[in-house]
Image: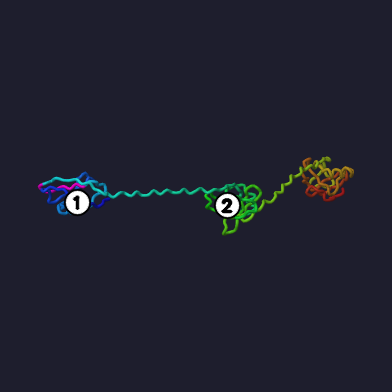
């Protein structure tokens, strides 16, 4: 960087010149910035360009006299400092954050098990619409339209397209009907002895004896009927209610073979 100076020689000896070389203290007077300048030019005022760090000009005579004179530079241009810009910090938005269950439908929002966080400014009161929900603390990204369940029973329903994230109305999760607890099976099965049974018995049955159990209702009928089986009774193989697996059973007390289907006596197969 450089600037111009006017160099005027006002004091000089008779033997100086006839030309002069000009130096500055910017490089400790090593290299002249102008050479062979006539004395007349210097007396009238010579304009030269010097380095911005120069503060002294040396005017050195050339010829018989080699003396010099140092002249301070006056009116050196000042450096205008670059103004420092102070940035005003952007205030952080004030917001309220809340954890919610969300979904594209009321059912999904009410049954979702994954929490997400939404942000808003101001307050939300049931019945008050227009508040915008955001997905970030900077309040720049509105949440997708849908249903947002803040766990207090009141669902925030955001508006349709064009008003993303804006609460339009409110809803509530439907009441959950508890699943009734099944009543334990208290049926009692009573053994009535062993009967000849198979899928192929005839009126002269032998062997193939199997235990028979009846439920409490059929047992009462069997007892009052003289310990005789009858159509409609359900036969079981044990006291835990395993249904009879054979298709015929011989009742020796009635000398009758009954047909059985899925454990139920369907009728008389043969009167022996």
- The disc at residue 133 is 2
Comparing 68 with 123, the one in front is 68
Specify the principal SS of the magenta part.
strand
Depth check: give the residue in front, 250 or 75.
Answer: 75
Count of all numbered marks drawn on residues in the image: 2
- Residue 123 placed where, x, y %? 60, 50
Q: Which mark is residue 103?
A: none
Q: Residue at x 34, y 48 (%)?
A: 81
Left or right of residue 128: residue 141 = left
Q: Position of residue 115 (x, y in %)?
A: 59, 47
Q: Nearer the viewer, mark 1 or mark 2?
A: 1
Measured as percent of width and height from the top left, residue 192 is found at 84, 41
The colour mode here is rainbow
**Disc assigned to residue 8:** 1
Task: Give whichever of discs 1 and 2 has the lower sequence position.
Answer: 1
Examine the rendering and report whether any part of residue 209 can be seen.
no
Name the residue furthest bottom.
Answer: 162
Give, as a single range, the part of the protein colored magenta.
57-64
Query: Quick check: 46 left or right of 87?
Result: left
- Dot 2 crowding, Cα within 10 Å, few <14, some 14–19, many 20+: many
């Amino acid at each position: 960087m450089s600037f111009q100076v006017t160099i005027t020689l006002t004091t000089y000896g008779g033997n100086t010149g006839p030309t002069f070389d000009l130096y500055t203290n910017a490089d400790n007077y090593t290299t002249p910035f102008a050479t062979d300048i006539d004395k007349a030019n210097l007396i009238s005022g010579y304009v030269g360009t010097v380095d911005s760090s120069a503060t002294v000009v040396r005017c050195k005579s050339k010829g018989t006299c080699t003396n010099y004179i140092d002249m301070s530079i006056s009116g050196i241009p000042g450096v205008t400092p670059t103004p420092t810009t102070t940035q005003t910090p952007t205030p952080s938005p004030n917001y309220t954050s809340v954890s919610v269950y969300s979904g594209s439908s009321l059912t999904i929002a009410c049954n979702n098990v994954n929490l997400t966080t939404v942000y808003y400014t101001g307050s939300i009161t049931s019945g008050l619409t227009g508040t915008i929900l955001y997905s970030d603390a900077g309040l720049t990204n509105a949440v997708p339209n849908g249903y947002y369940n803040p766990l207090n029973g009141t669902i925030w329903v955001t508006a349709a397209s064009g008003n993303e994230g804006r609460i339009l109305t409110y809803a509530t999760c439907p009441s959950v009907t508890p699943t009734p607890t099944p009543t334990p099976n208290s049926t009692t099965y009573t053994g009535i002895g062993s009967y000849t049974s198979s899928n192929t018995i005839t009126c002269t049955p032998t062997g193939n004896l199997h235990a028979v159990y009846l439920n409490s209702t059929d047992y009462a009928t069997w007892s009052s009927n003289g310990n005789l089986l009858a159509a409609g009774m359900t036969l079981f193989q044990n006291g835990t209610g395993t249904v009879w697996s054979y298709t015929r059973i011989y009742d020796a007390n009635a000398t009758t073979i009954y047909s059985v289907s899925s454990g139920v006596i369907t009728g008389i197969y043969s009167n022996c």
